[in-house]
Amino acid sequence: MRAGLLHGVVIEVFGTAAAAHRHPDLPELAGDRWTLVERDVLAALADTVQPQGVVARCAIPSAQLAQVLARRPQLLAVAVDVRDPGNAGTLIRCADAAGAAAVVLAGESVDSWNPKAVRASAGSVFHLDLPADRDVAGTLAALRTAGLRLLAADGSGERDLDELADAGALTGPTAWIFGNEAHGLTDDVRQQADDVVRVPIHGRAESLNLATAAAVCLYASARAMRTGGGAD
Amino acid sequence: MRAGLLHGVVIEVFGTAAAAHRHPDLPELAGDRWTLVERDVLAALADTVQPQGVVARCAIPSAQLAQVLARRPQLLAVAVDVRDPGNAGTLIRCADAAGAAAVVLAGESVDSWNPKAVRASAGSVFHLDLPADRDVAGTLAALRTAGLRLLAADGSGERDLDELADAGALTGPTAWIFGNEAHGLTDDVRQQADDVVRVPIHGRAESLNLATAAAVCLYASARAMRTGGGAD
């Protein structure tokens, strides 16, 4: 809510007196966009079963992949066929934290403005560019043309994330590709990638879930880009 | 299910004919622990709305912290007051993947055998020791006595994870402490820790969620322990 107000996407805010009392900065931030409403009005507006007392109407920012790439991003995430809105939102939050410029919602991925995705992103949908494109092959080709190295994250990847970091292969502009929660990445996507990379599993877990694997990969890139090379 | 069968904690398995057809290895793994049941019987046994066709009765393994510490673990996670079973299960899965020996469920943390925690762990509840202890201060004192460095993960921590890794401070035996989803760590826990550590936020996200922060911290330790020191 605060992120939306600060970044100019909020058109109007409806809040209860109790919410205004709990968060006195919200009516202040909202200014003449603030409307005081009764609890039952708010409940009818809200999407959740137990609303927190404020609802905002927002303009959905739109971003085209070409515009994003024209700004020469160093780090991007690409979600391919990520269907669960909670996963998509958490991925957007992670990508934001790791300093990525954008998350591309490719193929059959869920809309980044799905209410559950927005909530899981904890405000990060307002921080990053979130272009969507159904054409996965075309998206990946555009990323490569823009000079990004395409790293596909996959538990069965032939290269180990630590090995890539040690080899200094994470320091350049990178697009990390994450696949569907249940089915992973298609063969087509793996073949288009420069490398298919696995997060090392040191214990007996079969895999990591999408968001935790993405966090490890994106932070490995963020660290490599800042330290400039391999470990040791 | 397979993890439970392989690790000897499954006492008996109830499955439908359809499930046996889909997963022919399950009746085989279960042997004389397998009982064929009708769909409505299975539905009555199962905890989920759309059961997958097999239900197992398991013995809950119990682990005492003292036994865990006697095996001189190199990497542990401690959940303090982690209430959401999905978060606890995902943390257990992450800790397993990163090679941790145990996850200690301390304070008011949810039971690791909560059905949602078991599902979120994707089998990892059967791989790790999961001692529970209400006494947070006593737990942390026991970990310190066992020679573990106590690192408390907190978004407002005074030390940066990368800085610790660069300083070679992640190579020794380490217990990572993760706090409640909404309220973080108490002052008492911060004061007992050797360091309060923040995952660096490179973008504009306010924070990471529990599981993704834990993944980044635990993997930073796993990597440091294997490469033996700071970056560069």
Image (cartoon, coloured by chain):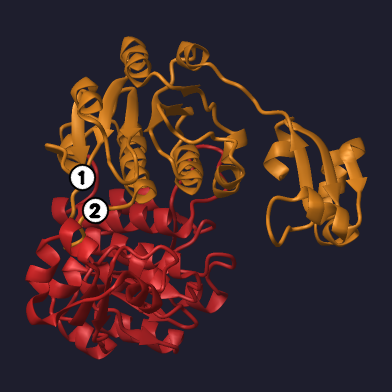
Chain colours: A orange, B red
> Which residue occupies 28% across, 42% down?
A183
> Which residue occupies 50% across, 82% down?
B108
Decide: is A103 above or below B166: above
Mark linked to residue B85: none
Place of residue A177 in the rendered image (x, y in percent of width and height, measured from the top left): 32, 31
Q: Which residue type carries mark 1?
A: Gly
When asked about the image quadrant of residue A128, the answer is top right
Secondary structure at numbered mark 2: loop
Q: Which residue is mark 2?
A: A207
Place of residue B165 in the rendered image (x, y in percent of width and height, measured from the top left): 30, 51
Residue A232 appears in the rendering: no
Residue neighbourhood size for the residue with mark 2, other residues' Cα within 10 Å, grouped as few (<14), some (14–19), many (≥20): many
> Which residue occupies 45% across, 46% down?
A87
Q: Badges 2 and 1: C-beta atoms under 8 Å apart?
A: yes
> Which residue occupies 87% across, 45% down?
A28
Place of residue B90 in the rendered image (x, y in percent of width and height, measured from the top left): 37, 62
Q: Which residue is mark 1?
A: A155
Residue neighbourhood size for the residue with mark 1, other residues' Cα within 10 Å, grouped as few (<14), some (14–19), many (≥20): some
Place of residue B161 in the rendered image (x, y in percent of width and height, measured from the top left): 38, 52
Quarter of the figure with the C terminus of chain B: top left
